[in-house]
Image (cartoon, rainbow, N blue to C red):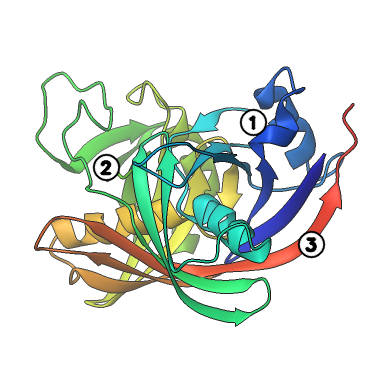
Amino acid sequence: MKFCKFHGFGNDYLVLEAENLKSVKSLSDFARQICDRHYGVGADGIAIIGKLKSNAADFSARIFNPDGSEAGFSGNGTRCAVAYLHYRKIWTEENLRLKTKSGVKNYRLLETIDAGHYRFEAELGKPKFDSASIPIQSKEKLETVVDFPLLVGEEKFKITAVNVGNPVTCVFVDDFDAFDWRETGREIETHLLFPERTNAVFVKVLDRNNIELRIWERGAGETMASGTCSVAAAIAACLRNETERKITVHSPGGQTTVFWRESDDEMLLTGRADFVFCGEWEMK
């Protein structure tokens, strides 16, 4: 089973072609095996690329987490998938339309840094703010979920949540070291308020143009970066009137640019995708 590994700011994905996975009985089991960092190749997820006979999109991409669950979308995972297509010279045009579980996303190649290393701008659609779309099981339907009180263990946090292809819950903090954000993230991910679980992101506003993140991803745990979490955190900060619509998002793996376009509500994410290696996985 041939694959190539790419990463977006340390958020690593194994990219495979769907036609090579026809004999795989369970993609969930396969994802758990190959993503295991001790007994497998190791990754934050897999991206499965498929060819389409459609006018709506050029390729499809399915994203699976290390726990075997399928994600609605991944900003870094899909960017790695698009980078794979360029690296393999399967696709050579500047623009590409990618069908995902959460809709068709548009990717534009901004720069080929060198072979296997690329920078893309992606149009990711429009955010959803109401409690039913996130989804959140609140007693009353909420048009937006901003500074909503959430009891986690014995501590209450104010959360701001949004769906950007995946549900993302943001907690704004002054200091990442003031509490155990990993344990809090783990508890928020599986909190009863979220029937489909959620990504948990801890956000520190640096100024009107910069925020810093710590990320606990649904189905993956702590990650060095996340495209969807970066977009959601930027939008949440803007909703709280703490930042502008175009900002730089700093995560342990690197920096991305998020632009929440006012004219049409479109979310734009600009970032890198970098080749690591290719290999072959023997099915077990």
Residue tagged 2: 161
Of 63 and 86, nearer the camera is: 86
The amino acid marked with disc number 3 is Phe
Of 158 and 76, nearer the camera is: 76
Residue tagged 3: 277
Q: In this rendering, would 219 be left or right of 270?
A: right
The amino acid marked with disc number 2 is Ala
The amino acid marked with disc number 1 is Asp
- Residues at marks 3 and 1 touching, judged by CB atoms closer than 8 Å: no
Circle nearer the viewer, 2 or 1: 1
Residue tagged 1: 67
The image shows residue 138 at horizontal and vertical percentages of 20, 23
The residues tagged by marks 3 and 2 sit, at their Cα atoms, a distance apart of 36 Å
Q: In this rendering, would 251 be left or right of 278?
A: left
Instruction: Report helix, strand or loop for mark 3.
Output: strand
Picture quadrant where residue 241 is located: bottom left
Q: Is residue 190 above or below residue 268?
A: above
First in residue order: circle 2 vs circle 1: 1
Residue 7 in view? yes
Of 25 and 30, nearer the camera is: 25
